[in-house]
Image (cartoon, rainbow, N blue to C red):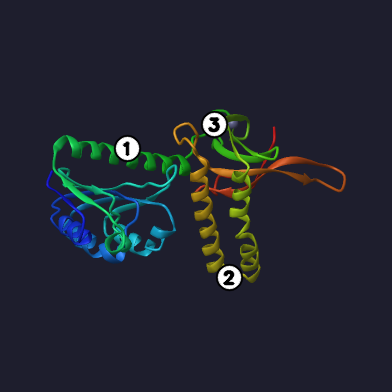
Amino acid sequence: MIGCYFTNLENIAICELRKTQKSIKAAVAWINFNHYGCVLEELLNRGVKIKILLNNDGINQRYINHIQYLNRKGADIRLVSFVGIMHHKFCIIDKHICMFGSFNWTHNANIRNIEDLNICDEVEFVNNYLLEFKALWNLSKEDIQLLTHPSCCSICGRPIINILFMEPEGDYQTKIDVLQQCSCEQKLVYTDYYDASVYNNYLATIHQFEDDILAVYQSGDEVTYQQIVAQQDFVVANYLSLVRTNRMGMPIIHAVGVKSWKWFDKHDGEFIYKIIWKERGTSSYIEDEYEIM
Ligand SMILES: [Zn+2]
């Protein structure tokens, strides 16, 4: 152990970061890039490899321009959605020192909150953090891979996608089914029950953007339209990550569908799955509606 600190944490963290020779692997829930962007850029200019996992939420999204800028300069900084909040605050420097504790790399954590920051160089200890980092890093990479490159059905050749289908059951429950679907087959791969608020909140999450999206779409303002859709994606993705209770047990969700009635003509129709949300990066292979087989 090198030390435990309770005050002046930002300066200590930045001083430690400045000592880096080769690599930084950090999983930190929140980072204020106005404060830490400079030191990270400095490290990149010296050839230090930077991998950072951040919690995917609005707080970190505010620095998306900073993040993209650093990534263009060679960093690999990712906003990741796990079950609940990725709440870690650790950073492994050059594979042999680990900073950890309650301290987020934010202004509030530095000036307002009561926090601790510890620095450790014990091999076994640091290795455990390295393993944890690797697990999180690969998990998120795998998710991205699964989302953007779904496996294809050996019979029909179409991508196999998982549609989350949510419906109220009785007054108190939300039933969630995950349907795995290609063009030739549909099967239920996961079912779970939550309380009724899950469905109600979910619809509210989607619907809060609907009027805006429609209005901007009709106005023809493409840029604003894309911004609102991106915002909706982000909020929905966050909400979905909360719904997934057990990320290992539940498959990755490519889209969300609701059962809705589709009229063929005045007299005839059928129930279909209407897709109301698609995960980012998946729209090229997900249809807008699917037949219920
Ligand atoms: Zn098929």
Mark whose residue sits in front, 1 or 2: 1
Check disc 3 and report its element: helix, strand or loop. Answer: loop
Q: Which residue is mark 3?
A: 153
Secondary element at tag 1: helix
Q: Is mark 3 within 8 Å of ligand 1?
A: yes
Residue depth check, mark 2 versus mark 3: number of the one nearer the observer: 2
Which mark identifies residue 252?
Answer: none
The answer to whether the residue labelled 2 contacts the one labelled 3, judged by CB atoms less than 8 Å apart, is no
In-image side of 10 versus 65 (left or right): left
- The answer, for residue 261, to whether it is visible in the render is yes
Location of the C terminus by quadrant is top right
Residue 60 location in percent, x, y?
A: 38, 58
Which is more N-terminal, label 3 or label 2?
Answer: 3
As drawn, the label of residue 135 is: 1
> Can I make out residue 181 in this image?
no
Q: Residues within 10 Å of mark 2 (few under 14, many from 20)?
A: few
Q: Amino acid at mark 1?
A: Ala
Location of ligand 1 given as a quarter of the image: top right
Q: Label 2 sits on what residue type?
A: Asp
The crowd level at tag 1 (other Cα within 10 Å; few <14, some 14-19, many 20+) is few
Instruction: Identify the secondary structure beneath mark 2.
Output: loop
Give the labeled residue for mark 2.
221
The amino acid marked with disc number 3 is: Cys
Mark pair 2, 3: CA separation: 39 Å
* Residue in the picture at 60% in, 50% down: 201
Q: Is mark 2 within 8 Å of ligand 1?
A: no
Callout 1 touching callout 2 (CB < 8 Å): no
Coordinates of residue 146 in the picture (x, y in percent): 45, 39
Disc 3 residue crowd, few under 14, some 14–19, many 20+, Cα 10 Å? some
Which of the two discs, 3 and 1, labels the residue nearer the N terminus? 1
**CA–CA distance between discs 3 and 1?**
29 Å
Whole-angstrom CA distance, mark 1 to mark 2, is 42 Å
